[in-house]
Image: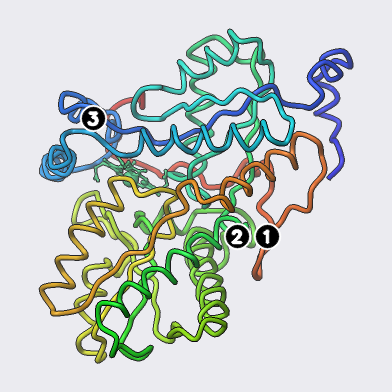
Amino acid sequence: MTLTHSHWDSHTRLGFMLAAGLYHGIMLVSFGGPRVPDDVMPFLRNVTRGRAIPSERLELVAEHYYHFGGASPINAQNDALAAALGAELAARGHRLPIWVGNRNWSPYLTDAVQQAHQSGCQRILAVLTSGYASYSSCRQYRDDLDAALVQTGLTGELKVDKVRQFFNHPGFVTPFADGLVAALGRLSSHDPTLTSADVEVIFTGHSLPIGAAMSSGFGAWREATGGAYLAQHRQVAEQVVQAVNLLQRAAGGPEVTHWQLAWQSRSGPAAQPWLEPDVNDAIAGLPGLGRKAVVTVPISFISDHMEVIWDLDIEAAATAAGLGLGYARAATPGTHPKFVTALADMIEERQSGRGDRAHIGRYGAWPDSCPPDCCPAPVRPHHQGARP
Ligand SMILES: CC1=C(CCC(=O)O)c2cc3nc(cc4[nH]c(cc5[nH]c(cc1n2)c(C)c5CCC(=O)O)c(CCC(=O)O)c4C)C(CCC(=O)O)=C3C
Ligand SMILES: [Fe+2]
């Protein structure tokens, strides 16, 4: 990668030399989650402001959080990732402070950009905690960052770029392969008679309204059947299966021969079509296919947050148990060293303009800057107000 004109234009020679790189800090940009029971309802109102989410659905989701003491695991997980990434960058000789900024709960993006600016940053690099294209997983975070700069009066004072969407980075795919191998091992140790033909692997993505899925990505990406979001999830599932089967062949373990992609965490009104099948419906079909066990692999997510532990470890596990199926869930990347290394590599790609833009499979690396028409905001006829 070579430096573009805009990089040089917006950076004085002196500033560039002092900083020894284009960026002065890193911002981990994430969803946010409640910390105590009193946070739960205001958090859910932030998430769903302006969205047509039925109030019954909100009450149901609130119970998921109350079940875990009103605290989402996402906060500790993002803090742990920020700490691991900071340590990796420091070990490589970079002096880059890291902030966490969230869309829906503290630390809010507005506070995070203010802190970055107060510490003297003029240009920071955002890392989103989602590796896929879609309005919810990419564009909305970029819009939130812009809105945070407007709200704090920092537009023009603080420039925020973002690391490319990393779905096909080997450092994102490999931890899922390791997690799936471990999950297959747990199933086998529980029931040593299981063969490949007995086990279904279900990769899960966060469901989206069909319209948002279809409009995700840009250009040829969007024209791929179902949009970029679907194509990227399929690609990650295929890459994980390939990697797992190489590992299993070497270790003499059962290979993955039956797998599918399903969706989880559907929200919104019943009449609105979302990506299907739901993971629970997919599991319900397994006895008819002769399967005895199922492994879920939540490839949409980077950590074992509430969508993973409630929707898979509790709900999907109960569906499987009710059908007499064995069940295991593969770990998400979390702070897997290869994932942390990958994030640091992608930061270095941008910081120094060097690096190999690692990616695997049939698609290229996602662009550093999404084109203007990428992942447009969904049209919401019943818009009820501005987002926070
Ligand atoms: C694509 C996608 C990701 C993956 C990308 C990414 O990671 O960003 C994601 C992640 C997450 N979603 C989360 C939580 C929630 N999502 C909701 C609602 C929605 N999600 C949507 C999409 C996504 N969501 C959509 C289209 C809606 C409908 C409302 C709308 O159009 O915006 C609701 C409202 C209640 C409900 O209906 O479920 C909640 C509570 C948490 C936090 C978990 C924790 O606390 O540990 C995380 C990481
Ligand atoms: Fe969500």
Residue in view at x 60 percent, y 56 percent? 171
Determine whether, in the image, residue 281 is placed left or right of residue 11.
left
- Identify the amino acid type marked 1: His
Residue under label 2: 168
Residue in view at x 82 percent, y 43 percent? 354
Q: Is residue 333 above or below residue 247?
A: above
Viewer-proximal residue among 5 and 226:
5
Viewer-proximal residue among 206 and 335:
335
Q: Nearer the viewer, mark 3 or mark 2?
A: 2
Ligand 1, seen in the image, is in the quarter at top left
Q: Secondary structure at mark 1?
A: loop
Residue under label 1: 359
Residues under labels 1 and 2: Cα distance?
5 Å
Determine whether, in the image, residue 367 is placed left or right of residue 270.
right
* Label 3–label 1 contact, CB within 8 A: no
Instruction: Tell me the number on the disc at residue 45.
Output: 3
Image quadrant holding the N terminus, namely top right
Residues under labels 3 and 1: Cα distance?
37 Å
Q: Nearer the viewer, mark 3 or mark 1?
A: 1
* Label 1–label 2 contact, CB within 8 A: yes
Residue in view at x 50 percent, y 67 percent? 177
- Identify the amino acid type marked 2: Asn
